[in-house]
Image (cartoon, rainbow, N blue to C red):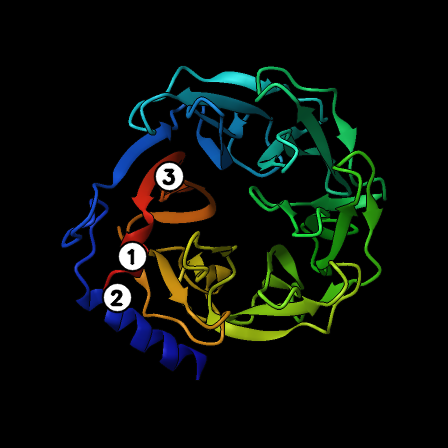
Amino acid sequence: MIERGIRRRTSVLALLAFSGAGAGYSGQAIIDSMLAPAAKENRRNTEGDIVVRKDGTFLAAWSDFYGGSRDDSAARISAATSSDGGKTWSQRFTLQPNIGKQNVMSASFLRLRSGDILFFFAVKNSPEDLYMMVRRSSDDGKTWSEPARVVRERGYYGMNNDRAVQLASGRIICPVYFTEKVWTKTEGFRTVSYYSDDDGRTWKRGRTVLECPQRGAMEPGLLELRDGRLLQIIRTQMGMIWHALSNDGGDTWTSPEPWTMAAPEAPSTLVRLPKTGELLLIYNPTVKLGTGHSGPRTPLAAAISKDEGRTWSLPKAIEEDPAATYAYTSVTFHQERALLTYYYAKDGLLSLKFKSIPVDWFRED
């Protein structure tokens, strides 16, 4: 049933007029640039995020791998700025040096209602030792505090790029995945929430741990629904995004179940559109169970839901090269545009791409 539905969805994708430049779109132009191109000595630039400074410039950060392209290769968090809406970028600079035995990676920015910016990243020491840290800026990203730990438990605890959220209540919540030891035949990922009620200065672990079949519950994302509940979406190997709900700000959760969207074993990004309040999902729509990652991470597509995720528009391609793969998307809204970063992988190189898309593009047939 899943594969039939995906074949139909993929055939629809093939019929649409895809273009990275937005062919057929009647509004403003789409801005497309290679933020951090990979090279032989720097084969991977991935897991990025963007924060908009008060003067309108963009600050982007990402995992900059200088010791190979594996998840455990040496990496720092690099950054660059843009003052022309993302058309061009400054020379990269180091935002967070490598303080791990293996690397630091997976950048998340969170602009707080207080005006401060939080910058989250992972410190990786071994297959059994990964944890999240946070730094704070009170001067719009010019200077940053010393890193402080969010996760203090032992184990392999990670959070994807662009995942931290602040709720209407003011609570800050980080959706975390964990396992005792990664890359083993018996590994089983689970998810748990970490939250702060004092503007990110201290952190508590939520009470509920979520589990899914096969490799487990991986790389969760969060969104606050209109009725005040929290929706957690979860990467799985089941050919579907799974989900759980929370009535108490992420402390406890319902048992995870399949959600309303099919996807391979790849992270999906869920956000709410400004003004209209519709949900926007950016994901890989092609599922092929029994293959690597349960399907290719191409195309990269967007879908809209007007009813809080119960039904969705047909997917609309953001990227469509069948010889490339795309994943780990971040979304930041600014002046009625969606600012996206995601990796673009081709010929063994993983570059970080930027795309600025008018919000109306996602809603236009």
- The answer to whether 69 is drawn above or below residue 67 in the figure is below
- The answer to whether 20 is drawn above or below residue 354 in the figure is below
Circle 3 or circle 2, nearest the eye: 3
Q: Which residue does the numbered mark 3 point to in the structure image?
A: 335
The local secondary structure at tag 3 comes to loop
Query: What distance separates the C-alpha of mark 3 from that of mark 2?
Result: 29 Å
Q: Are marks 1 and 2 in contact (CB under 8 Å)?
A: yes
The x, y position of residue 37, in whole percent, is 36, 28
Q: Amino acid at mark 2?
A: Leu
The x, y position of residue 120, in whole percent, is 65, 34
Q: Which residue does the numbered mark 1 point to in the structure image?
A: 317
- The answer to whether 141 is drawn above or below residue 302 in the figure is above
Left-right relation of 269 to 99: left
- The answer to whether 58 is drawn above or below residue 336 in the figure is above
Q: Residues within 10 Å of mark 3 (few under 14, many from 20)?
A: few
Q: Amino acid at mark 1?
A: Ala
Q: Residue at x 71, y 22 (%)?
A: 99
Q: Which residue does the numbered mark 2 point to in the structure image?
A: 13
